[in-house]
Amino acid sequence: MSSPKRPDAQITHVGIFVRDMDLMIEYYIRMLGMMVTDRGPYYRGGEIAFLSRKADEHHQIVFASGRPAGERSSINQISFLVADLETLRSFYAAFAAEGQQGLDPINHGNAWSLYWPDPEDNRLEVYTYTPWYVQQPFADLLDLTDPVDVIHAKTLAMIKEDPSHRPRDVWVDGQRAKLAK
């Protein structure tokens, strides 16, 4: 199924209803290096806070008060792209040293990911791309204590027999062609 040609629109932020505004703000600042760009009364009632890691992006995360106690999160995941595998490994080491519970490193073949729950059980992810594409869903265990070259070798060995496997740049070129139609 093809979609109609539309002007470019990119996802830039996500909004989350929260139970404990102060706890969530402190956590996202400490764990992800975000900053509060604005905070105040919410026109729908309660409070709203805007957080970002980019100087030119007013907000990447919006917290709005009003999530009822005991209500389960409806968020599958909120994902943060990092520059490279070494950066992902540094997040893992820092989170493990801090005692963050629920760390779940996964090798998707096309990305290396680290998942974990925030204080209100929203699933977070930091990830980076691998040099390859492989059809998704695809998931295997990932040991982020392995050296970078070992992770590269293990990933390639894991996906090289998959018929969908190809270099990432070849896959990206194919996606560009599809979007241009």
Image (spheres, rainbow, N blue to C red):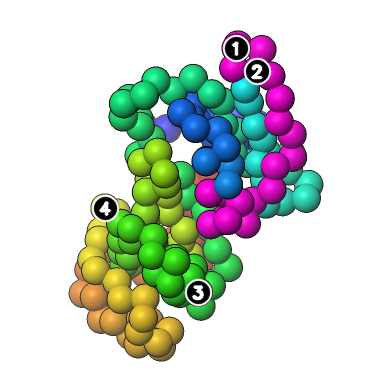
- Check residue 90 in the rendering and tell me which mark sits there, or answer none: 3
Point out the stretch of residues depicted in magenta: 27-46
Q: Name the mark nearer the viewer: 4 or 2.
A: 2
Amino acid type, label 4 = Pro
Amino acid type, label 1 = Gly
Disc 1, SS: loop
Q: Name the mark nearer the viewer: 4 or 3.
A: 3
Query: What's the residue at 72%, 51% (across, down)?
Result: 54
Query: What's the residue at 33%, 25% (across, down)?
Result: 71
Disc 4, SS: loop
Q: Are marks 2 and 1 in contact (CB under 8 Å)?
A: yes
Q: Name the mark nearer the viewer: 3 or 1.
A: 1
* Residue that numbered label 2 is attached to: 42
Amino acid type, label 3 = Ser
* Residue that numbered label 4 is attached to: 137
* Residue that numbered label 1 is attached to: 45
Give the image location of residue 119, x and y in percent.
Answer: 41, 44
Amino acid type, label 2 = Tyr
Instruction: Depth check: give the residue in front, 138 or 170.
Output: 138
**Cα distance between the residues tagged 3 and 1:** 39 Å
